[in-house]
Image (cartoon, rainbow, N blue to C red):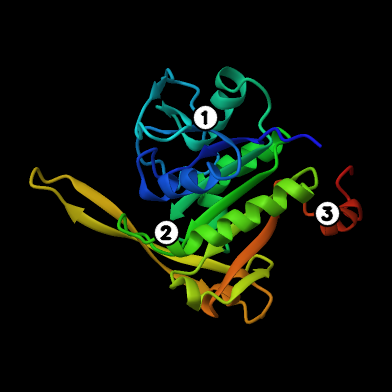
Amino acid sequence: MSTKKPLILVTNDDGITAPGIRALIEVMNEIGEVVVVAPDSPQSAMGHAITINNTLYCDAIVIDKEAPQKEYSCSGTPVDCVKMATRQILPRKPDLCVSGINHGSNSAINVIYSGTMSAAVEAGIEGIPAIGFSLLDYSMNANFEPSKKFVKNIVKNVIANGLPKGIVLNVNIPNLDRDAIKGTKICRQANAHWVEDFDKRTNPMGRDYYWLTGKFINEDKGEDTDEWALQNGYISIVPTQFDLTAHHFIQELNNWNLND
């Protein structure tokens, strides 16, 4: 039996120095050989954006001299980081990509906007098993200690069992003490959305500017959703696919007179 450690790519969207990714790196070092390629500055809510009109920089750096991982700071988006890692940095295709741990929720519709999950999705597109991790605490002082046991167990299960082609895992962790977390729930994405507005203001020079604001509305009463799990003390695990085809509507469209 091979004793070779799995090669694990670690990335995020909060930036390479964010506490969440430092916690994730620590856990991954217990499991495999770790290479970090992450943004040099916060890239939250970038979705699946890539850099095509600007140059990209990716520099080897040392943040923790005592830690064994190799680290690279990238000027691009989370998706850029995965592309850069697989095409320029890693010696071979990684056995796993983990993204996060994000500061804040990526449940329900938030998965669409999330740079954390887009990095995981990009890895999935490239045939790499991938997981996005998020903690429901936006603070840079968030406590990631209660998450570590669960993150390690989920990662070890993915390495042992693999993931189907086209599937990545979206894992959200409630902001609770370790003993208060009841366990994990396999869930579907809740039917929830943001009701948004812009707070219009005027700067001292007389020019108008805007801050995006909004309220999160969960219209889903199901007890099998990520929102229900999180509100009831469970870690939600949603198997997420990047095939956006509405397969159930194909037959209906075929009945339209689109060729007349």
Q: Quadrant of the C terminus?
A: top right
Residue that mark 2 sits on:
144
Give the amino acid at mark 2.
Phe
Mark identifier at residue 247:
3
Give the amino acid at mark 3.
His
Mark closest to the chain's N terminus, 3 or 2: 2
Between disc 3 and disc 1, the foreground one is 1
Residue 191 appears anywhere in the view: no
Residue 60 appears anywhere in the view: yes
Between disc 1 and disc 2, the foreground one is 2
Between disc 3 and disc 2, the foreground one is 2
Corner quadrant of residue 43: top left
Residue that mark 1 sits on:
80
Q: SS class of the residue under badge 2?
A: loop
**Tag 1 near tag 2, CB within 8 Å:** no
Mark closest to the chain's N terminus, 1 or 2: 1
